[in-house]
Amino acid sequence: MPIMPKLTERTFEDCPEGLHQAVCVDVVNLGELTKPWAEAPKTYVKLVYQVDVEDTRYQVSTRDLNLTANSKGKLSELVSAWRGKQMSEEELAGFDLEQLIGKNCQLQIVHAPRDNGGVFCNIQAIVPAPRGVIKLRAADDYVRVQDRPANGNGHTAPVAVPDDDEVPF
């Protein structure tokens, strides 16, 4: 999985607070990072979602998530909440995060103030998508981070979205 490039400038609007239907559009490998509280570097990922609110498309992402199969990790908590039931360490060990791309959920968005003004759109909670609603798809112009020219891969095709409605876990 390629490593996410550093962003130099924010060029998008903040998603409004509330519970919103969303679709996962990317799983981004942030590479090995050493956090201030950690003794050693660990591999982190970030999940990227698109949210539709009153005919406006927003993009939000998780905080950095330690890529671990530990059932007590934040990644496990997120996937289990999305799934609607706890995942075992064995299920987590064999789970491919790429399966999340194209899957719908609901995100509870809350705002937290930024040091420089503005707000940070925090994903407070994730739950399964409601039954019987039209499923969201990634915007046609979305290109996965790993496929962007900045990563040395001239590929610009939009993300492929599986047709099945069920989350595969």
Image (spheres, rainbow, N blue to C red):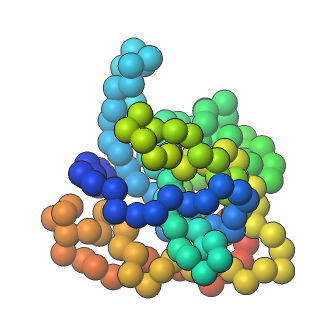
- Seen from the viewer's position, the closer of residues 145 and 121 is 121
| Residue 90 visible | no
Q: Is residue 23 above or below residue 16?
A: below
Residue closer to the observer: 40 or 94: 40
Please tell me which residue is depicted at 61% across the width and 36% down the height of the picture: 74
Q: Residue at x 63, y 67 (%)?
A: 22
Above or below, comparing residue 158 to residue 146 in the picture? below
**Could you say which is closer to the camera, residue 55 or residue 50?**
55
Along the line of sight, the residue nearer the viewer: 17 or 42: 17
Relative to 151, is 134 above or below? below
Q: Residue at x 80, y 53 (%)?
A: 84
Query: Residue 17, percent across and down?
Result: 65, 55
Q: Is residue 165 visible?
A: yes
Q: Quadrant of residue 169?
A: bottom right
Residue 60 on image: x %, y %: 51, 58
Residue 64 is situated, as x and y percent measured from the top left of the image, at: 46, 40
Q: Is residue 90 left or right of residue 12?
A: right
> What number of labels is visible?
0
| Farthest residue, direction right | 132
